[in-house]
Image: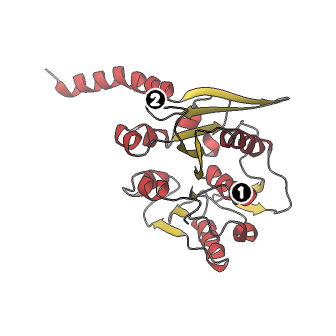
Amino acid sequence: MNYKNNWLSCLLVLLPMLIFSQEQLYKEASLVRQNDTLNYRILLPENFSENQTYPLLLFLHGAGERGSDNKAQLTHGSTLFTAQENRSNFPAIVIFPQCPKDDYWSNVDIDRSKQSIQLEFNSQKEATTALTLVMELLNEQLDQPYVNKDRVYVAGLSMGAMGTFEILSRMPTTFAAAIPICGAGNTALAEKYAQVPLWVFHGAKDNVVAPLYSLEMVEALLKAGGYPKFTLYEDANHNSWDSAFAEPELLTWLFSKNRAQP
């Protein structure tokens, strides 16, 4: 009997079921404003009760997961919050919005003519439609009595990390902590949220979004009086989120932060 082939066959049968189960845990929803729609998935804590309060985490995906299927945004990071140990130890409301294909989380000019993209941020630009809808969605959630307003967090990877830096600058008093992974931001706006605890991640070999962008953001935060936590993975390329999600203290660090206690 070929046990290896049998094991692979079982895995191929179970994999769609695991993906389906994952999608079922994150409930589908949409925010509609006139002609604009923001699809999102929301994960509620086990034994959720509106009579209790919970932390809220907003997770912003990368450019490759943009679309309208309300599924692709769960590709990276979603399983971190559905792992049984994490659901038990860190009960929280987790929201994964999906950016439409023709939009972006951050208002930035992008030059893709080189292997490592060139980014230019302008502090005078308005938020994109996608990020505007995310902020509306977040404000709606903050109006709910079961959301702990002192424990609201934002995280994102690549394009989502750019959105993380930007939403911090536009809502600087909202978040208790943030995790931008392999991203970039407007250094001129760092002083607006320098006191928010950040854990910034990047791969030293990133040839898509250069690690210098994160280094520049960390430098700007330090100059503004902040104390960001920074991890640079010497062997990681753009997918440094894999290493970040594997950090044993990641969620402990994040959910320990309270807006009233930086």
Q: Looking at numbered disc 1 in the image, what kind of residue is underneath it?
A: Glu
| Residue 198 coordinates in the image, percent (x, y) | 56, 63
Q: Residues within 10 Å of mark 1 (few under 14, many from 20)?
A: many
Relative to 107, is 130 above or below? above
Compared with 38, 105 (above or below) is below
Circle nearer the N terminus (2, 1) = 2
Find numbered disc 2 in the image and state the secondary structure of the residue it sits on: helix
Looking at the image, residue 189 lies above or below residue 175? below
Nearer-the-camera pick, 109 or 223 = 223
Disc 2 and disc 1: Cα gap in Å?
29 Å
Give the left or right position of residue 166, taking residue 196 as reference. right
Given the current orientation, which residue lies at the most extreme left position?
1
Tag 2 residue: 22
SS state under label 1 = helix
Nearer to me, 240 or 196: 196
Q: Is residue 240 visible?
A: no
Q: Look at the image and name its color scheme.
A: secondary structure
- Please identify the quadrant where the C terminus is shown: bottom right
* Position of residue 54 in the picture relative to residue 131 (left or right): left
Residue 148 position in % (x across, y down): 57, 47
* Residue drawn at point x = 50 percent, y = 42 percent: 92
The residue tagged 1 is 166
The quadrant in which residue 142 appears is: top right
- Residues at circles 2 and 1 in contact by the CB criterion of under 8 Å: no
Residue 125 occupies which quadrant of the picture?
Answer: bottom right
Is residue 111 found left or right of 44 in the rendered image?
Answer: right
Indicate the amino acid at tag 2: Gln
Q: Quadrant of the N terminus?
A: top left
Can you give x and y, in whole percent of width and height, for residue 10 in the image? 29, 22
